[in-house]
Amino acid sequence: MDGRDTLIIAIDGPAASGKSTVAKRVAAALGIVFVNSGAMYRAFTWWVLRNGADPADTPAVLDLLARTDFVCGEEGGVGTVAVGGIPMTRAELAAPEVNAGVSAIAAILEVRERLVAEQRRYASERGVVMEGRDIGSVVFPGTPHKFYIDASPEVREARRRAEGIADSIASRDKIDSSRKASPLVVPEDALVVDSSELGIDEVVATVLEAIQAKGTPRPG
Ligand code: CDP
């Protein structure tokens, strides 16, 4: 599935750029499922920590990966993920120790290959708005609907602080942008929207207009 038959909207961008909020609203407007691919990397990071492994210990992480099941589902139009049979909650996914370890885990090629396969399988069964770091560049390069939601570092730090979450977004951005495997990039044919000074309604409207302008084939 490459986004030509089923509606696949790819939304990428750095941490706390507002892409989750935008992606959720766009998915609701189109009546398709919102999937945060970061939740999968976070879920596996939580599982690694829960099993007492160090995210920096790649052999231990890979050993665990080979023995771990991921189940991606849907609840109320939002993608869900269970790891090792445990459904993940928002609190677990946003835990400070997960924030601190996730970029190291997400930099491992084998982890990415496994989760990208899950993401493609998921989208082969339904239309999705999927957000992440490599959705337009690597996961669904064939979709015509690619967006990159950006915001200044100051605005992004302030947004995360306002959520009351301890999160080293500058260090995650550095790892995410400089890693060898699928670094965060602006996909060539993506529409870049800077949300620093735009309201959420304006960003959502811009994205929806661009999707409508290209046409929206429906599944089936
Ligand atoms: O919400 P926020 O933008 O802060 O992060 P997220 O989307 O939950 O992603 C958490 C981390 O997972 C990122 O910092 C990346 O290291 C990794 N990630 C990735 O490598 N590729 C994706 N498609 C999504 C997330």
Image: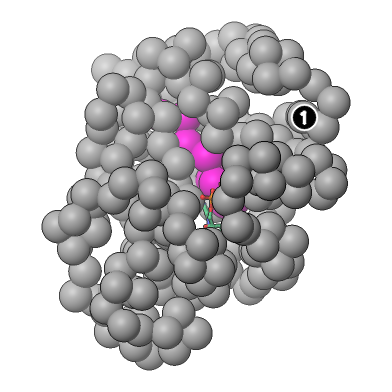
Name the residue rendered at 33%, 36% in the picture.
79
Q: Is residue 161 above or below residue 86?
A: above
Q: Is residue 73 above or below residue 22?
A: below
Front-most of 96 and 128?
96
Q: Is residue 194 above or below residue 166?
A: above
Q: Which residues are magenta?
A: 128-137
Q: Secondary structure at mark 1?
A: loop
Place of residue 105 in the rendered image (x, y in percent of width and height, measured from the top left): 47, 72
Q: Is 136 covered by the magenta stretch?
A: yes
Q: Is residue 200 above or below residue 212?
A: below
Q: Which residue is mark 1?
A: 195
When asked about the image quadrant of residue 111, the answer is bottom left
Name the residue rendered at 38%, 13% in the picture.
31
Name the residue rendered at 30%, 68% in the picture.
47
In the displayed structure, does residue 55 sit left or right of residue 14? left
In the displayed structure, does residue 65 sit left or right of residue 205? left
